[in-house]
Image: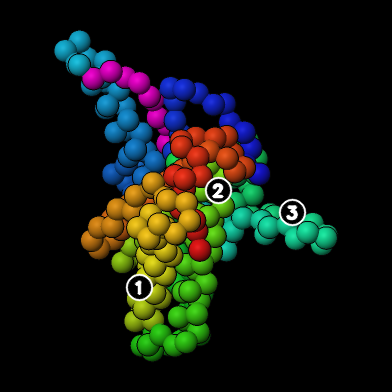
Amino acid sequence: MLSPSKVSATHRTVLVVGDGLAEGVGDTLATGGLAPRINTLFADAVREARMPHSSLPLKLTWTAASAGRLKATSADWLPPPPAVPGAPPPPPTKNLFASTFLTRRHGSPDIVIILLGGADARPATAHLRPDEEADDAVLAAAATTAANILTLARFLSASGAAVCVGTVPALMGVTTPAAGAFVKEVNRGLTVGVAGALAGKYTGDGAAAAGRVPVGGDAAGGVASKGLLGGGGGGGRGPPRGGGAANRPTWP
């Protein structure tokens, strides 16, 4: 269960989670990656709204933070498994998910941006020579990575947060042909998974999902331009936000 945060009618929070890309490693322009970039944009908007000549009302303030960790894999961010009726409770989860969401460190963010998958490429391809192509084991590992990321997205969405899943940038972990195939397969799995979660919006099957899935071009960095947005809603484990279950995708 996500720890409760102070619910404010005028303030919202964004949390970036994942690997070194989420942490901002190597991003000297923003001195910290995506979260500082978001905060800079928010600060600019606030200054503009407070200018004497501005006609823009300031109704919300936003704060972004990062919980990314260099070399973190998708397995490091897995939420606890669901309880099985009649079975003993699973042991407490001790990973990055637990230290971030099961404590009061970040509370319950309104929006969570997930940037994961690049650090999974190295262990998935370690058994191959640098010149070897991807084999079935690499493709299976890519499917597992995509499934881990979607599991995290599903849990956070059910907890009341709006979730944005970034595809793995083309340069993350791509040093061999096998690593390139791994990243491509992870991104395919993420795209198919989120599209399937929102299929009810177009087919009328189940609760209509009001969230949108913006799909762009090649992902080169930051929030991948193929950002996949799942709408947030009320209910679930966190404080309610938005329009309830009808606004959330039914994750596969």
Q: Give amino acid for label 1.
A: Lys
Residue at which label 1 appears: 184
The first of marks 3 and 2 along the sequence is 3
Along the viewing direction, whichever of 68 and 154 lies nearer the viewer: 154
Q: Tell me if residue 57 is in the magenta stretch.
A: yes
Mark 3 vs mark 2, CA separation in Å:
20 Å
The first of marks 2 and 1 along the sequence is 2
The first of marks 3 and 1 along the sequence is 3
In the rendered view, tell whether residue 111 sits above or below residue 59.
below
Q: In this view, does 83 lie to the left or right of 86?
A: left
Q: Give amino acid for label 2.
A: Ala
Tell me which residue sits at (20%, 16%) in the image: 55
Q: Is mark 2 on a helix, strand or loop?
A: helix
Q: Nearer the viewer, mark 3 or mark 2?
A: 2
Q: In this view, does 176 lie to the left or right of 217?
A: right
Which numbered circle lies on residue 242? none
Q: Tell me if residue 138 is in the magenta stretch.
A: no
Q: Give the range drawn in magenta.
A: 56-67
Residue at which label 3 appears: 92
Q: Give amino acid for label 3.
A: Pro
Tell me which residue sits at (47%, 22%) in the image: 9
Residue 224 in percent (x, y) is at: 32, 56
Does any portion of residue 84 appear in the rendered image? yes
In the rendered view, tell whether residue 65 sits above or below residue 157.
above
